[in-house]
Image: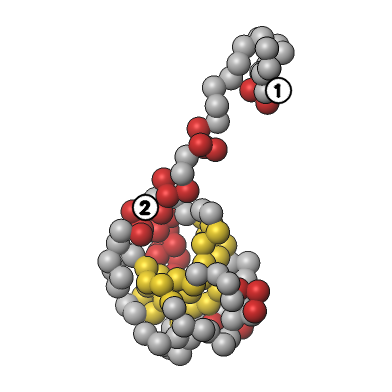
């Protein structure tokens, strides 16, 4: 009998059920947000107090939905838009990523990419200069 050791417990001699969190599709998960790459001219530090609050509110709102729900949202509503143009301010290591933008205060947007369930915020376009809106 070939049983994976990670699912077999020697104490009880029983097989544990599979980890459901590993079998869920990314689309069924809620997003996580990372500010790891946020900086430069589109950094959070350049935002006003109201813009920072709206950014935090939007991240909270988005984190309560699944990726599937977000991708079904309207472009200028709770959803997103794909950016299909080159962004000269982005480092080359992001050139192969599908860049997307979420609105956070009116038409102001957070720009980044998703990798599995994590959305990496690369910039906050508060003055509409990061890409062609």
Find residue 36 and report its horizontal and vertical position in percent.
63, 67
What number is the disc on residue 27? none
In the picture as drawn, the residue positioned furthest to the front comes out as: 1
Specify whether 14 is left or right of 55.
right
Q: Characterize the local packing of mark 1: few (<14), some (14-19) or many (20 or more) Cα atoms within 10 angstroms.
A: few
**Is residue 52 in view from this perspective?**
no
Image quadrant in which the C terminus is located: bottom left
Give the camera-side residue of 58 and 102.
102
Residue identifier under label 2: 68
Quarter holding residue 80: bottom left
33 is higher (above) or lower (below) than 5: below
Give the camera-side residue of 60 and 19.
19
Callout 2–callout 1 Cβ contact below 8 Å: no
Find residue 16 and report its horizontal and vertical position in percent.
58, 19
Q: Characterize the local packing of mark 2: few (<14), some (14-19) or many (20 or more) Cα atoms within 10 angstroms.
A: some
Find residue 67 and report its horizontal and vertical position in percent.
41, 54
Secondary structure beneath disc 2? helix
Secondary structure beneath disc 1? helix
Residue, x 44% and y 62% (percent of image)? 59
Residue, x 62% and y 11% (percent of image)? 14
Specify whether 35 is left or right of 9.
left
Give the camera-side residue of 3 and 77.
3
Residue, x 65% and y 74% (percent of image)? 93
Mark 2 → mark 1, Cα distance in angstroms: 34 Å
Residue identifier under label 1: 5
């Amino acid at each position: 009998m070939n049983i994976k050791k990670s699912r077999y417990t020697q104490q009880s001699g029983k097989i544990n059920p599979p980890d459901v969190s590993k079998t869920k599709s990314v689309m069924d998960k809620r997003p996580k947000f990372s500010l790891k790459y946020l900086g430069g001219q589109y950094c959070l530090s350049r935002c006003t107090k109201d813009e920072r609050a709206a950014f935090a509110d939007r991240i909270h709102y988005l984190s309560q939905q699944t990726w599937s729900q977000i991708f079904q949202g309207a472009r200028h509503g709770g959803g997103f838009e794909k950016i299909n143009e080159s962004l000269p301010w982005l480092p080359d290591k992001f050139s192969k990523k599908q860049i997307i933008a979420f609105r956070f205060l009116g038409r102001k947007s957070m720009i980044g990419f998703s990798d599995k369930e994590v959305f990496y915020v690369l910039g906050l376009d508060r003055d509409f200069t990061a890409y062609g809106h």
